[in-house]
Amino acid sequence: MNQEPTTSSAIEIRELVKEYRAGQPILKSISLTLPSSGLTCIIGPSGTGKSTLLRCINRLVDPTSGEIIVNIAGQRTDMAKLRGSELRNARRHIGMVFQEYNLVDRLSVMENVLTGRLGYLSAWRAWRRKFDAEDFVHAQQLLDEVGLGDFASRRADSLSGGQRQRVGIARALMQRPSVLLADEPTSSLDPKTSIEIIQLLREQGIQRRIPVLVNIHDVDLARKFADRVIGMTGGHVVYDGAPEGITDEHLSTIYGGKAWLE
């Protein structure tokens, strides 16, 4: 891997650009440094590049240019430069929670959580779903932690939206990640469940001493639970700081106009 000496930051993004069409960047020279702990929320209108930013970090999307230095198992690795087996090995250390859960409906809750360990198995063992006994123990512990200890044998398609997202969080944690990313994890949930999910993400980050980076539309949730808020608009970062520092003027810049604030 392309590695640098370890420092206290978990993610360092330098001049990141992403173009889906030549000359039309979605991300426009983004530079950010994320600390090794805490909950960071990214806010901003749809289409401004929030999801693209997260997907560049774990390389579900290939960046056009720039660097994405992630502290993985004590080594600083430029995710933008990795290919093949090196990329697969690095990606397994970055947990991802998806907006639409991305569960396999026909599988049990336990089986869905165990898929978080597939990246650590050989191709043959992954195909046969040959998990170690300790993987089953760890998966059950995670289900207990997310409040689904009695649901291990239930099919994923029998769960509510909030329960499905809890399974998604347990699956991401099953990777024993160095970084946890969450792409709009509350967008399909009711207000009460949204609070529970963002609290769970924050608590798990604290417990495991890993940074949690969340894209979120709900500004109030970001203000209440985040340690840091990043505001994006038009592919640029226009606010980066404490949640209590966000003013209506900032929000007007981020979202365009003030009518939505009334």
Image (cartoon, rainbow, N blue to C red):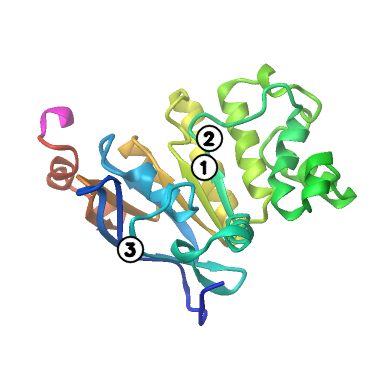
Residue situated furthest top in the rendering: 158
Alpha carbon distance from label 1 to label 3: 24 Å
The mark closer to the camera, 1 or 3, is 3
| Mark 1 / mark 3, whichever is N-terminal | 3
Is residue 246 something that shows in the picture? yes
Q: Label for residue 27?
A: none
Q: Give amino acid for label 3.
A: Leu
Give the number of the disc on residue 196.
Answer: 2
In the shown orientation, is residue 66 left or right of residue 9?
left
Q: Is residue 259 magenta?
A: yes
Q: Is residue 135 left or right of residue 83?
A: right
SS for dot 1? helix
Q: In the image, which residues are magenta?
A: 258-262
User: In terms of sequence position, does the residue under pointer 2 or pointer 3 come before the other?
Assistant: 3
> What percent of the width, then of the height, locates residue 27?
27, 51
Q: Nearer the viewer, residue 61 or 206?
A: 61
Crowding at dot 2, Cα within 10 Å, few <14 / some 14-19 / many 20+, comes out as some
Can residue 223 be seen? no
Q: Position of residue 247 (x, y in %)?
A: 18, 47
Residue assigned mark 3: 32
Residue at 67%, 52% in the rendered image? 175
Q: Residues within 10 Å of mark 1 (few under 14, many from 20)?
A: some
In the picture provided, is 161 more to the left or to the right than 33?
right
Query: Looking at the image, which is closer to me, 209 or 64?
Result: 64
Label 1: which residue? 199
Q: CA distance from mark 2 to mark 3?
A: 28 Å
Q: Quadrant of residue 14?
A: bottom left
Q: Secondary structure at mark 2?
A: helix
How far is the residue under mark 2 from the one under mark 1? 5 Å
Image position, residue 172 (x, y; %) = 62, 46
Q: Residue at x 56, y 23 (%)?
A: 161
